[in-house]
Image (tube, helix red, strand yellow):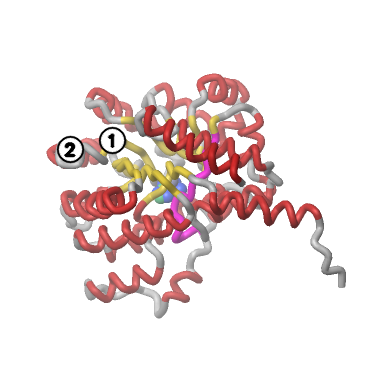
């Protein structure tokens, strides 16, 4: 047997190590998607809720998805164990620990109040638990974060308006964290235009706007998110490639795409990681970033996502660095804080 290390595997290992230590931002992360099976079982026990799985292993074995909807069905069912402020705190604290292990310095976190208010959980409980964990991490370690309240697009615009009205009295209390509005859940058949009026209201209120588009939905949904919702970032956006004029526009405007490679693989948006278009999007001049989406369900946090694309697409060290730079440019921090992150990244690159 030939045990010699080939040049490509040697350089692959070096790039893996470079990625593992590289400072990062994460801009596409659903906090409910960080609920690991172990914690789900622990919370189920704490809240005396029966889960339809015999064990952690049986639950994990069910994470075999054919598309976005097959995942969402399980994801919303899993969120049922979240009942108290402490539950939201524990889930968020667990995510922060995983993110910090992957050298994430700043995370912009989606949360879906409707998933919880529909079950009778007060919206104030959701805000309080997530925010307390984020503030503790900020105080303790300088871990940066932003909260992005997301509307579920399979529900009505009226429901989104009601959620906004319920959340607005909390705005001042969470002014240090709650900066953004997002749109997620079942994309096909729920185009951005459905939420035109509620986004217009959020814009008037001064929120930063993002939306999922072009994950399973067509490139036209990306255009709708830009022109009708006036978002400044597109979450996923990988199907933009189907429209050359849109690709030119995204490159020219440097509109960030928050791409989630392992998510795309697990939800069958791509058949094989080697077929992922991330490198082509990057080569076309788009502001592509790497993110983990729902890491407890998709098999990996930030480093795993970087490693998966770097290996499958044979990315160079310079391309990896560009992805991390894009992640800093695209975040909602003030320019001086972005400059600090850029400085840390460039120092890391110079030293490794
Ligand atoms: N990848 C995804 N797409 C749409 N909605 C989601 N909610 C959680 N993850 C999502
Ligand atoms: Zn997402």
| Residue positioned 28% across, 66% down in the render | 81
- Picture layout, residue 318 above or below residue 13: above
In front of the other: 221 or 256: 256
* Mark seen at residue 179: 1
- Picture layout, residue 88 above or below residue 166: below
Q: Residue reaching furthest front?
A: 351
- Residue 159 appears in view: yes
Name which quarter of the figure residue 6 lies in: bottom right
For residue 262, side relative to residue 224 (left or right): right
Q: Residue reaching furthest bottom?
A: 54
Write down the region rendered in magenta: 288-298
For residue 317, side relative to residue 201 (left or right): right
The CA span between labels 1 and 2 is 9 Å
Residue 155 x/y as whole percent: 30, 43
Q: Residue reaching furthest right?
A: 1
Residue 250 x/y as whole percent: 54, 25
Q: Is residue 289 within the magenta segment?
A: yes
**Quadrant housing the N terminus:** bottom right
Q: Which residue is disc 2 drawn over?
A: 171
Tag 1's secondary structure? strand
Name which quarter of the figure residue 315 lies in: top right
Q: Which badge, 1 or 2, is on the more N-terminal residue?
A: 2
Residue 147 x/y as whole percent: 30, 43
- Residue 216 appears in view: no
| Residue positioned 58% across, 35% down in the render | 322
Tag 1: Cα neighbours inside 10 Å, few (<14), some, or many (≥20)? some
Tag 2: Cα neighbours inside 10 Å, few (<14), some, or many (≥20)? few
Q: Is residue 180 within the magenta segment?
A: no
Name which quarter of the figure residue 335 lies in: top left
């Amino acid at each position: 047997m030939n045990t010699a290390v080939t040049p490509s595997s040697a350089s692959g290992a070096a790039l893996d190590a470079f990625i593992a230590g590289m400072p990062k931002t994460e801009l596409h992360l659903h906090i409910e998607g960080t609920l690991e099976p172990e914690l789900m079982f622990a919370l189920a026990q704490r809240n005396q809720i029966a889960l339809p799985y015999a064990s952690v292993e049986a639950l994990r074995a069910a994470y075999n998805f054919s598309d976005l909807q097959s995942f969402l069905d399980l994801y919303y069912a899993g969120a049922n164990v979240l009942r108290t402020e402490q539950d939201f705190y524990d889930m968020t604290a667990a995510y922060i620990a995983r993110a910090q292990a992957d050298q994430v310095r700043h995370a912009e976190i989606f949360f879906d109040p409707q998933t919880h208010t529909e079950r009778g959980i007060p919206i104030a409980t959701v805000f309080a638990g997530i925010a307390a964990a984020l503030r503790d991490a900020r105080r303790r370690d300088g871990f940066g974060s932003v909260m992005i309240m997301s509307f579920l697009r399979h529900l009505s615009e009226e429901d989104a308006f009601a959620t906004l009205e319920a959340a607005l009295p909390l705005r001042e209390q969470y002014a240090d964290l709650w900066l953004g509005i997002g749109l997620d859940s079942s994309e096909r058949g729920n185009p951005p235009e459905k939420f035109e009026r509620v986004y217009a209201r959020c814009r008037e209120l001064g929120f930063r706007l993002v939306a999922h588009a072009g994950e399973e939905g067509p490139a036209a949904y990306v255009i709708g998110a830009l022109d009708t919702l006036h978002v400044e970032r597109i979450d996923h956006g990988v199907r933009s490639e189907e429209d050359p004029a849109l690709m030119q526009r995204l490159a020219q405007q440097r509109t960030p795409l928050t791409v989630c490679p392992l998510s795309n693989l697990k939800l069958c948006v791509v058949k094989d990681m080697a077929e992922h278009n991330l490198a082509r999007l990057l080569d076309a001049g788009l502001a592509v970033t790497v993110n983990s989406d729902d890491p407890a369900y998709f098999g990996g946090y930030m480093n795993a996502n970087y490693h998966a694309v770097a290996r499958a697409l044979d990315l160079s060290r310079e391309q990896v660095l560009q992805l991390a730079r894009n992640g800093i440019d695209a975040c909602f921090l003030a320019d001086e804080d972005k400059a600090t992150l850029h400085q840390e990244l460039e120092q890391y690159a110079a030293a490794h």
